[in-house]
Amino acid sequence: MARRFLVLFCLLSGIGCIRWAQAKAAPVQPGNTTIVTIGQSSARLYGPWKFTVGDSPIDPVTHKPLWAEPGFDDSKWETVDLTPAEGSIDPTAGLAGYVPGWTAKGHAGYWGYAWYRIRLRANVKPGEKLAVGGPSDVDDAYQLMANGVLLGSFGDFSRRRPTIFYTRPMIFQLPQQDVEGPASVVLAFRFWMEPTTAMQQPDAGGMHNAPLLGDAGTVAAAYQSQWVELSRAYATTPIFAFLYLLLALTAFSLVFFDRSDPVYLWIGGVYLLAATSSVLLTLAVWTQALSGEAGNVVTDIFLTPLTSSGWTMIWWVWFRLRRPAWLPGAVVALGALLALSTALGDGRQLKLPIDDKQNSRSNDN
């Protein structure tokens, strides 16, 4: 028994070190026409933006969205300002400059498509390369169009329902201008937000920080800086994965010293689940190897119920309890029920049609 409490002390000490590291990992602190003068510089596009929920009708001639066209009249749309409040912080990643989304601005509970438009006049030189730094904090995916031309997207829009990924910085090149003088540009963002995102966050929807317009080199430097900031915000995640894996291997190795005690297998299994969760988060944030939807399914439906059930069984086995005899069966049943209810909830949301009445609300234009 003394050996088991020594093992418990070591494992709990490991957890304490991880939690202390998490606590010490402080978050990173922080008219309708906008005129921008470009000269090896850039400007943050805080607004005024024109905004509406719903999706654009398609031009029968060009087969492109009407709301992306520069001549479209968006005067009846809402006006949105993306200027962040002083000291605002992203509640998830701890990044500075956070702006609440559309669910906090009159569209509570709305999910689906929505559009942002802004008219710009940029003074540029012939051949000067301009770029747009996409918003680095969004819900959930978007396409960017300039004067009706698609520049690129964050997320996969090749299917009827877009595939989303964890938010990250993006950069888009604008077409070059051949003559010197003011360049008129209408930027249009077509956003998609998942229904589960609207359920999880009270101020979700669209852009949570402003895009950047400027010289391509300057925007590229800001793009790299945003990646550094994102990397710093999640730098501890792979460290936690390594530490949880180390604790799992330590627990498993104790079986060789006491084969009669299964508690070490339970402890190792729970720590292995925690390591898996941290690895999946790392892959989702820093790569596009895992979509946001797939990551949520694996974590919510499988890892969370298994981890909760595993910790209960650890204490049952550790103290060699025999009563109540129905507890292990109840743990299995409740874990399965949690996984099933989560799957049904996510499935109900994921199967909602895109042309649902709530999602089809749009401006009369």
Image: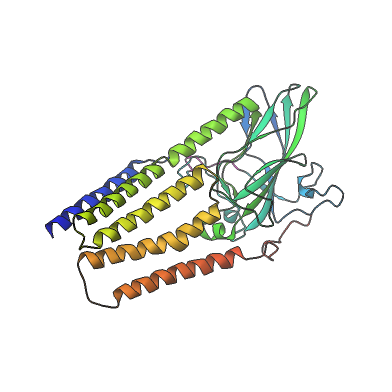
267 sits left or right of 116 in the view? left
Q: Residue at x 28, y 58 (%)?
A: 267
Quarter of the figure with the C terminus? bottom right
* Rendered position, 138 above or below 360: above
Can the viewer see residue 28? no
**Magenta residues, start to end:** 82-88
Q: Label the magenta part by its dominant secondary structure.
A: loop
The percent coordinates of residue 53 (x first, y second) are 68, 55
Question: Is 292 included in the stretch rendered in magenta?
Answer: no
Q: Up-down: is 138 above or below 42?
A: below
The reply to whether the magenta stretch includes residue 84 is yes
Residue 204 locus on image (x, y percent): 56, 53
Where residue 280 appears, as percent x and y from the top left, is 46, 50
Q: Nearer the viewer, residue 340 or 95?
A: 340
Q: Quadrant of residue 221?
A: top right
Q: Nearer the viewer, residue 258 or 333?
A: 258
- Direction from residue 237 to residue 261 in the image, left or right: left
Q: Nearer the viewer, residue 73 or 125?
A: 125
Please tell me in which quadrant of the rendered image residue 236 appears.
top left
**Is residue 66 in view?**
yes
> Which of 233/328 is in front?
328
Question: Which residue: 41% across, 49% down?
Answer: 278
Position of residue 257 relative to residue 341, above or below, is above
Q: Residue furthest right?
A: 61
Residue 184 located left or right of residue 161: right
Residue drawn at x 13%, y 60% as measured from the top left: 1
Please report the residue visible at 76 percent of the width from the left and 45 percent of the height from the top: 68
Residue at the far left in the pictured view: 2
Q: Is residue 308 above or below residue 40?
A: below
Q: How many marks?
A: 0
Task: Indicate how the structure is coloured in the image.
Answer: rainbow
